[in-house]
Image (tube, rainbow, N blue to C red):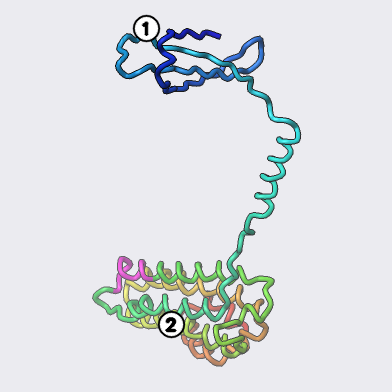
Amino acid sequence: MFYARLPWQRRFSRHYLRFSECYKFHGLPLLSLIRLSFPHPSLTNKSQLVFQTTHYPLTMPSFTQVTALAAVAFAAFTNAAPVVRADPTPLPAIFTQMVSDLTPVTSALSSIDSSNATEAVVGPLTNQVTTILTGAVSEISALAGSPLSTILSTADGVISVTDAANLLAPVLTMVYGAAQDVLNVVDSSPAASVITPLLNEAIGALDPVLSTAAPLVDGLFAALAPIVGPVVNTLNGLGLGPVVSLLGSLI
């Protein structure tokens, strides 16, 4: 220890400024506290500053302390709030959303005439139809294994199979109807060879929707038959039979 003091310094109050540093002494960790003692403010001779150094050993935490800290950490982890997974969207909501999303797109397709019945106009619209239907398939697939009370649930309760068919029917009739309107415009024109494959692709996106939803609700196709049967027959006559074969075979 180093400690030096002038005799007259005892008459003045001291103010301490502590610094700390860690180092090892004989292999043991030590905490060194250095006290810097300031004499009376009138003293300007810095050589009369007083230093005192004291060493405090740093002890390692005991096994009991480490165990207690580990127990607290583990308790915080195990008591954390569980991850809450959102319930899958029921079919009525999926069908309703599809109708809402498809309405402006199919309306745009139905408004096409001979002046704009081109691949540049029709292509982006049919792509939108395909995207909407493909997105719905992912949501419908998430319902696999759910009880019927969840699959057909609404804010007002569980709906019947017939009601579910009535919600899905506009999806089919809008897509089929828009395709029929475009085909009526391009039929017998050179554009038909370009436009028809685009419509086939859009209507073909309905097949996964139907094949994914049907196993979830027994009798869904039977309830759809009287609604979409006439449309399917018309599209068969327009050369779009291959893409509606799934529904047509069940009607």
Residue at the right extreme, as displayed: 64
Judged by depth in the image, the label closer to the viewer, 2 or 1, is: 1
Image point 66% across, 9% down: which residue? 26
Marker disc for residue 47: 1
Q: Nearer the viewer, residue 26 or 108?
A: 26
Image point 44% across, 12% down: which residue? 50
Residue at the bottom extreme, as displayed: 226
Write down the region rendered in magenta. Answer: 117-125
* The image quarter in which residue 249 lies: bottom right
Q: Which x, y percent locates residue 215?
A: 66, 77
Quarter in which the N terminus is drawn: top right
Image point 36% across, 70% down: which residue? 125
Marker disc for residue 174: 2
Q: Which x, y percent locates residue 30?
A: 60, 18
Q: Is residue 187 visible?
A: no
Image point 59% across, 16% down: which residue? 55
Tell which circle, 2 or 1, labels the residue nearer the N-terminal end. 1
Amino acid at circle 1: Ser
What is the secondary structure assignment of the residue under circle 1?
helix
Q: Nearer the viewer, residue 34 or 29?
A: 34
